[in-house]
Image: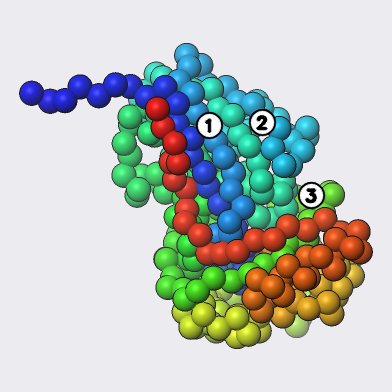
Amino acid sequence: MAAETTPLREVVAVAPGKVNVTLAVGALADDGYHPLATTFMALDLYEHVRAVAADEISLQYASGSIPTDELSCGEDNLAIRAARALAEFTGTEQGVALTITKHVPIAGGMGGGSADAAATLIACDRLWGTNLTNEDLLALGATLGSDVPFAILGGVAIGTGRGDSLAPTMVSGTFEWVLRLSDEGMSTPATYRALDEHRARHRAHLSVAAEPEVAEDAVLALRGGDVHALAQALDNDLQAPALGLRPDLAEALEFGETQGALAGIVSGSGPTLAFLAENAAAADALATRFADAGHRVVRASGPVLGARVIEQR
Ligand code: C5P
């Protein structure tokens, strides 16, 4: 006789934010996206999603460490879209009341919205007992946003295509980061557009690869746990356009690099800046210097695991 299972009433899942250690952007393709070759690292800043069984699908934000006033809880919200996509894919008619506590900066280029969607997929899949394979969850994630599959996978991975085709990468040790936040977010499409405009203006000088290359130097540095080599390998094609749109970031980059960081980089499409430090003590000291100079910073380490359930009842 098969064992009866009591339906779950509540599941809590977490998913990490990320930094793009390298990000090479190819030429704009016909589908409106740029082919990428990027190295993702998941950081220990987690979005928490509490999913409670309900008749309808709804969302609210808990008072977490990040103000969420500007975020919509409507149908355009990526977490709501994730729950609806899973319901549609599996044919379930169950609902869920979602409560998200955010710890990843909003519109910061750190994949916070994607982590919300990833944790929502994992939480609802458990709550509803729909038991998708990891492969199906990754594919469903990719329909929601380019960075959602990585938030499910975690660790370090090379992302190609739109960044959603992932190859996990070996890493030794932990890397220590200081993230410098901005009060005002940036729009991802606007940063890509600025890159295209910059490239169009310099067409005579630049030949942009259709398929950008994976950064082998970063992969080797990660595999060897070599923080100095990784600092040298940090690279982001979106950095120049992001600094063009937000000149104030250049000064903050300079500040971090002269105050003890091995290197600094714009995270993803910005405006968060990620500074790599030699070790935890150096990162703590750098964070203090930034804070003393009036900047908002958070400490983070990585890599960490991807989206997972941490509580259920
Ligand atoms: O996939 P996601 O929703 O994160 O992308 C938001 C926008 O960023 C896209 O509509 C596109 O304009 C731009 N983008 C891009 N190339 C990528 C990823 C995003 O041009 N690889």
Secondary structure at numbered mark 2: loop
How crowded is the residue under tag 2: few (<14 C-alpha within 10 Å), some, or many (20+)? some
Image quadrant where residue 258 sits: bottom right
Q: Which amino acid does label 2 sit on?
A: Ala
Residue visible at 48% across and 17% down? 54
Secondary structure at numbered mark 3: loop
Q: In which quarter of the image is the C terminus?
A: top left
Image quadrant where residue 48 sits: top right
80 w.r.t. 193: above or below = above
Residue visible at 65% across and 71% down? 280
Residue 308 in the image: state x and y as whole percent.
44, 45
Q: Mark 1 points at which residue?
A: 50
Which of marks 1 and 2 precedes in the sequence? 1
Q: Mark 2 points at which residue?
A: 62
Which residue is more in the foreground, 187 or 134?
Answer: 134
Which of marks 3 and 1 precedes in the sequence? 1
174 w.r.t. 190: above or below = below
Mark pair 3, 2: CA separation: 20 Å
Which of marks 2 and 3 precedes in the sequence? 2
Q: Please identify the residue farthest to the front as the structure is shown.
A: 281
Asked if marks 2 and 1 touch (Cβ < 8 Å), the reply is yes
Residue 27 in the image: state x and y as whole percent.
63, 67
Residue 138 circle label: none
Secondary structure at numbered mark 1: strand
Asked if marks 1 and 3 touch (Cβ < 8 Å), the reply is no
Q: Mark 3 points at which residue?
A: 185
Q: Which amino acid does label 3 sit on?
A: Gly
